Each structure stands twice: as structure tokens, then as C-alpha cells.
């Protein structure tokens, strides 16, 4: 009597020998999410601030793009050298007094390990989960490795890219591209629930939220 394993393997061999073409994978794109807050509005940005803070990220909110440079410089502090994606807006680093290394040509892992921080943008952020997504093909986000090796990550997120729910975020992303989902600083816990940060990514995460600021908050 043929067991379940043998039956599965037999079917695979039959399909292989028949030369059957691979079945294309169709990713559904017609999401109809129903977020509680409108994307990019004051409420959804405030919610993202709250959930990011719960994940032990430090958040600064600024009213406009012109204010990003000062916020980024404040987060970087006395950092000596930072790495940035090739297409990061130059204005974001105009107030930083240290050295900027654009990842072009690509840095080696050893070089990244000796840099103080990385500064990137984000493709989209999810307010309810405190998550932002990096698209490695985007000019202001760059290769995945540059956000995993340095110990400090500063991420600039525009209000227009903040949505309420995960389905809303997925609807904005290209699933064929390498995506990195970030929810707070890198952290893990052992069986006794002792939290250790920085095991598989930056131990410090700072976020600049641009826009969606209520009058009087700035």
C-alpha cells in the first residue's frame, strides 16, 4: 500500500516527466481594505507614533520636509560616519556634521560593520502594527544589508505613506521585489523571556514622521 509520502513523490515525478509547465502564481491585487483611519491623516500618523513607541523606537514628528534635516541630525548626534542609499535626498543630511557614505559602489559587510548608522526612507508604514516596509529597489531605501548590519537605523517616513492596516500596505507594495518589514529595534527573547536587542539587526531605531502634525504639536 502506497503511503502519503510515496503518493506525493509519485505525483511529482509524473508531473516532471510529463514536462508540465509551471503554474503561474497570481497575486491578488484587488484589495478592498477598510482601515479605521484615512491614509496620511493626523489620526493614522498619531497611531503610528504610538505603536512605534510601544516597540521601543524613538519618534520625532515634524511638520514639513524642510524640518527633516534637523531631526535626522539630532538622532545621529555625534556619529562619525553613516551609510545611506544612493538615492536618499541630500537635504535630509544637510545638518549632519559627520561623514556620509553612499552605498554606491556597494559597501562590504565589513565596511558596514564599522559605520555608526544608516539613514533611509520607507515604502509604506502600518499604523496598527507599528511596522514600516523597506523596498530594496527604491532609491531612498537601498539594499537590505545596509539596514541590517549598522547598529543604528534612522528612518524617515512621510505621512502620505502611512496607512492603517496591513492589507492597505500590501496593496501598495510590489510582491516581486525584496521587502523588509521592520517593527521596532531588532530584538529576541530566550525561553525565560529575557529580551536581547541587536541580535539580527539594529539595536536602536529612530523614526522621523513627516507631516500629519496637528497645529500646536510642532
Image (cartoon, rainbow, N blue to C red):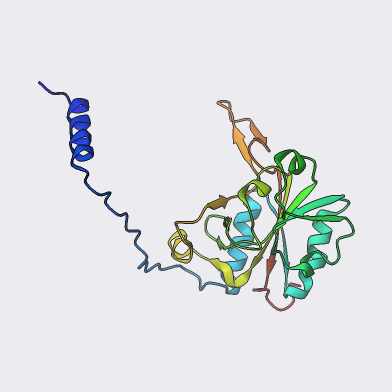
Percent x, y of residue 7 = 17, 29
Relative side of 72 to 87, left or right: right
Q: Residue at x 83, y 60 (%)?
A: 73
Q: Is 17 left, or right, of 134 in this rendering? A: left
Q: Nearer the viewer, residue 7 or 20?
A: 20
Task: Compare residues 46 and 183 and report the one nearer the observer.
Answer: 183
Extreme residue in the left direction:
1
Q: In the image, what residue occupies the spot 21% across and 46% down?
A: 20
Residue at 86% of width from left, 61% of height from top?
Answer: 96
Q: Is residue 2 left or right of residue 177?
A: left
- Foreground pick, 65 / 195: 65
Please, is residue 70 above or below residue 116 in the view? below
Q: Quadrant of residue 77?
A: bottom right
Q: Quadrant of the N terminus?
A: top left
Marks counted in the figure total 0
Q: Position of residue 82 (x, y in %)?
A: 79, 52
Q: Quadrant of residue 93?
A: bottom right
Q: Can you give x and y, in whole percent of width and height, for residue 39 in the image?
A: 53, 72
Amino acid at each position: 500500500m502506497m503511503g502519503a509520502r510515496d503518493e506525493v513523490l509519485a505525483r511529482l515525478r509524473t508531473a516532471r516527466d510529463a514536462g508540465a509547465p509551471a503554474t503561474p502564481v497570481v497575486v491578488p491585487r484587488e484589495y478592498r481594505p477598510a482601515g479605521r483611519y484615512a491614509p496620511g491623516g493626523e489620526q493614522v500618523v498619531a497611531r503610528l507614533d504610538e505603536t512605534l513607541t510601544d516597540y521601543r523606537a524613538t519618534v520625532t514628528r515634524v511638520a514639513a520636509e524642510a524640518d527633516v534635516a534637523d531631526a535626522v541630525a539630532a538622532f545621529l548626534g555625534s556619529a562619525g560616519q553613516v551609510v545611506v542609499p544612493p538615492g536618499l535626498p541630500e537635504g535630509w543630511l544637510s545638518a549632519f556634521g559627520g561623514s556620509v557614505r553612499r552605498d554606491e559602489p556597494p559597501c562590504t559587510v565589513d565596511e558596514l560593520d564599522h559605520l555608526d548608522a544608516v539613514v533611509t526612507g520607507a515604502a509604506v508604514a502600518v499604523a496598527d502594527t507599528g511596522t514600516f516596509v523597506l523596498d530594496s529597489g527604491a532609491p531612498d531605501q537601498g539594499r537590505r544589508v545596509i539596514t541590517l548590519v549598522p547598529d543604528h537605523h534612522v528612518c524617515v517616513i512621510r505621512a502620505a505613506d502611512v496607512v492603517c492596516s496591513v492589507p492597505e500596505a500590501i496593496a501598495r507594495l510590489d510582491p516581486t521585489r525584496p521587502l523588509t518589514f521592520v517593527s521596532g529595534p531588532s530584538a529576541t527573547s530566550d525561553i525565560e523571556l529575557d529580551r536581547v536587542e541587536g541580535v539580527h539587526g539594529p539595536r536602536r531605531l529612530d523614526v522621523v514622521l513627516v507631516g500629519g502634525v496637528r497645529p500646536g504639536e510642532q
